[in-house]
Amino acid sequence: MIPFLAAALAAASILQDSVPPTPLRTIAVDEAFASAARLAVGDTVSISSRPGSDAGAGELVIVGAVYTRSADPSEVARGDYKVRFHLDQLQRISGYGDRVDRFAIATTDSADIARTLERVNRQAFGFRAYRSKDIAVETSRTFLVVSRFHRAIGVITIVASSVFLLCIMVLKVEERRRDIAALRLMGISRSSVVQSIVIEAGLVAVLGSVLGVLLGWATSLFVNSHYQALYQTPLEFSILTPPIVAFAVSLSLVLGITAGLAASWRLVRTPPLTLFGR
């Protein structure tokens, strides 16, 4: 019996050695966490629900993917690191079982969102469903305040630049009072003189708008590259859109033409000899 038992144990040992080991589960980490912890795809790490646990006390997993964060303004300043687990793996590690703190429901474009919210809220007491856009508004109030602050600064800047532009145009036209007087004495009509000054002011305004758009575009690139690298997010902090460009060019053209009209109309109504100082 002993030789038979030894043969059975040897066969069992060979069978156990031939069984492949259970493959390790995989996780996905975000770019910020991967950069801070110097992780790469294929690395083996130990995970545990208790911070500061020994490496042998946790579960060994493999980093299967490194994903890019979504452009969510509410997550920019939080500085959280994110790890994605399999659902059963997360339940086992966290010890939550079948409980969850939050979950998201994706709907189609034709779905009745209000009716869906009502049905979800009737299921149990203690939780409430919200639209994703409502949550985004609540968590982005800081950005809303900053946006209003920038809008106020923009209005003040436009008003101040309008006054400055009008003063510059008045001074430039005043320097050409003798030229305007000479044109009037040559028989050039008032409307022709006004039109020439307005056209010149419009061209200067358009040229200034182009330079301003190029400066704004370069500034937006610098701001985005700096803060995207700082917060490690694809969120765009400065956006230069076609409507903004069209508004800036139109406003500059209107202000330039208005300043040209105001500056030239005062001189053309003055007698030419008076412009010569006689």
Image (spheres, helix red, strand yellow):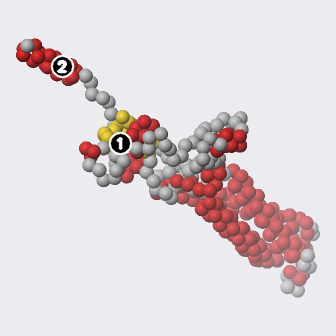
Q: Which residue: 33% across, 33% down?
A: 24
Among all residues in the image, which is located at the extreme bottom?
278
Q: Please tell me which residue lies in front, 228 or 17.
A: 17
Q: Quadrant of residue 182?
A: bottom right
Q: Which residue: 49% across, 43% down?
A: 99
Secondary structure under tag 2 reads: helix
Among all residues in the image, which is located at the extreme left?
2
In the image, residue 54 sits, relative to residue 222, either above or below, namely: above
Q: Is residue 57 left or right of residue 110?
A: left
Q: Which residue: 74% across, 62% down?
A: 252
The quarter of the image holding the C terminus is bottom right
Give the amino acid type for the residue marked by disc 1 in the picture.
Ala
Q: Residue 270 at x, y = what percent?
A: 90, 78
Q: Which residue: 82% across, 77% down?
A: 178
The quarter of the image holding the N terminus is top left
Question: Crowdedness of circle 2 by 10 Å Cα count: few (<14), some, many (20+)?
Answer: few
Q: Please tell me which residue lies in front, 168 or 106.
A: 106
Kindly report which numbered mark, 1 or 2, lies closer to the viewer in this rendering. 2
> Which residue is tagged 1?
40
Secondary structure under tag 1 reads: loop
Q: Quadrant of residue 185?
A: bottom right
Q: Is residue 261 left or right of residue 52?
A: right
